[in-house]
Image (tube, rainbow, N blue to C red):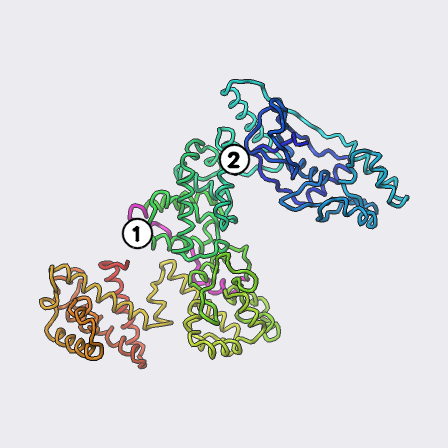
Amino acid sequence: SGKIQIPPFQRSFVWESKDIRFLLDSIYRGYPIGSFIFWKTTRKLPRSRNVGNIDLEMHSFSKGTEISYVLDGQQRITSLFAAVKGAKIDGDKYRFLFDLKTKKFVVKQGEDNISYIDEDISNLQISIETIFTESRAAYRSIIRQYPVDYEEVLDNIYDRFVGYRFSVISVMDKETDDEDEKSEGVRQVVDMFSRINETGRKLTVVAKMVARCWGEGYDLSEALEEFYARHKELENIREQTLLQAASVILNHRKSRTRDILSTKIHKLESEWDNIVTAFLLAVEFVKTKLKVKNLDYLPFDALLVPLTYLFYQQKSLSNEQTASIEKWFWRACLSNRYDSTVESKLEEDCLEFDKVLEGKEPDINYLIDWEQLSNKLIGQRYNLRNAFVKTVLSLYSYAEPKNLTDGRDIRFEGLFSGYYKHNMHHIFPQAYLRKTYPEQKDYFDSIVNIMLIPAITNLEILDKEPSQYFTALKESNNNLDEILRHHYIHNLDDSGIFENDFMKFLSYRAELLVEAFRVKTGISSELQTHFAINPSKPLDILETRIRSFIHENLKKQTEESYWEDRIPTDIREMVNRKIKDVIKRHPYGLEEYDRDDVKIQFLDVMDYSKILISNWDVFGTLLGSKQEAEKHFIALKHYRNAIKHGRSINEIDRRTGEAAVLWFESVLSQNYPQE
């Protein structure tokens, strides 16, 4: 009857159908299956759960009706209800049957038992639900339809199940009207529940904490259910991660099981909403700043724990703090930091985040084998359960991959399904590789050979050779080169794709991935990456920054325009000529050309040098050596002119030019950081 209930502090049903078959077989053989322990009370507990789908209308019971709450044996009793009463498990109805020929239990999905009786008879099987009919007479009327040869077997299984003696222990609740005594009685029951479950299949820390909270009047189970109901995209984030995040906040950065279980419950309850807010800010940081759009790519849930600690203390981060946390994230992922001894590392990282909050640099020198990283990438087979694979997929996500055919962003949210969901595409298709490179089969599924594109595009490519489908894409899409940069393929001509050279391609792309990881971890600068793949871009970025650097510092020297007093005469005259030429072609918006921030945009590289040198009283302390500044400007000029005009450049000019870019970048980063 519905008088048996699951108390709210019990974990959810976790058995699978094979576990239930094993339990039924044990009963059939007459083996002991352990005791059921019930807490018998007249109290109507809030949020108690039914066994299976057997409905219980609490209001139909008169006051004083005794209810049996399951303290031990929930998995077994739910299994029996599922098999005997036709209950559902996780929304699915299972039919458990005994095969009369093999004398083994089988499981099938199905709805009401009556619809299947003829089929069961034909298959020489009988359902457990049929065995437990209203009476032996009703059972006899059913089994008469089976071949007479199986009458003894059918009688035997009925007797074994109906006559099985279950061991039941009842804990009686003390009748009292005293509220303190009632509360103490609940705490004792919760303690008993925890002790019982210390043996056998261990309770998780979440189950223990739910029970402990419930015993002190806080329904943590309801809080967790509400959290996941509101944020369905986080359903794969473990409940334990949330409790670890709460623990590092409430227990001085500690998150071991004993720390979680020693949390002051009233404090957890009062701070729960703030902890959830911080947790969601951590998730938002991962998705927007780190651009890991799909949380399935997060190598470790635990990464969210110190981030939650950080955002609990401070709701938004400065640019410098963000840069530090980004480096921490990628180093923690690449070093496989949370693969073991997680709790101690969480504490260490929370301590380092305290430094970040104080405006200091954290100590995040985790061990990464840069020399072997390229080989590791090539040799790593795609497997979404692997943390290293998830790290690489996170990097792919960071690059904001585009559809090869039209350049649209790949959508990572749950909006794409079927043909339009993002898909793991083999750049060198497997069918093509099996025909062409059978000796390289160990590398077919290399994570380096994987690209994120919509499934419909993947189907269009199928088993075509790379040179064929990339040539077709290039002919139909003028922006393909730019799109491929979002997939870490920066130059098709160098990639090995047009030669259909699989191993050359893997080496080429692996090196680009290594360089991207070096930038993300702060080992290399982004400018160094651009030197190899798009040398014009760092020059454009640098020129913009130098102009802004000059403008902002000269603007501080006067309340009015600095142009007449601070800009050399020959430069002013040159700018005036350029402006007149523009006005002739575009005679509108004339007033804007009187502004200093507009005029300064007409300067050339060596104009910057002359302005800085002529205003050394302003820039001397920022640039250090006048001689060094002039030397680097000359090198920058030669390098820039060669790059911008497509001229060949010798190795010396290239290296001195790149060094000049890095020198200016270093100076500007110290004195004029980017926003």
C-alpha gap between disc 2 and disc 1: 37 Å
Tag 2's secondary structure? helix
Above or below for 164 versus 346: above
Q: Which numbered dot is residue 210? A: 2
Image x and y of residue 412, in percent: 48, 59
What is the quadrant of residue 523 in the picture? bottom left
What residue did someone put label 1 on?
Answer: 318
Q: Residues within 10 Å of mark 2 (few under 14, many from 20)?
A: many
Image x and y of residue 275, in percent: 41, 41
Say what amino acid the circle numbered 1 marks.
Ser
Residue sitting at the far bottom: 647
Residue sitting at the far front: 60
Tag 1's secondary structure? loop
Image x and y of residue 240, in percent: 50, 42
Image x and y of residue 73, in percent: 65, 34
If the image is split into quadrants, where does the C terminus sit?
Answer: bottom left
Is residue 586 shown in magenta? no
Identify the magenta region. Answer: 356-381
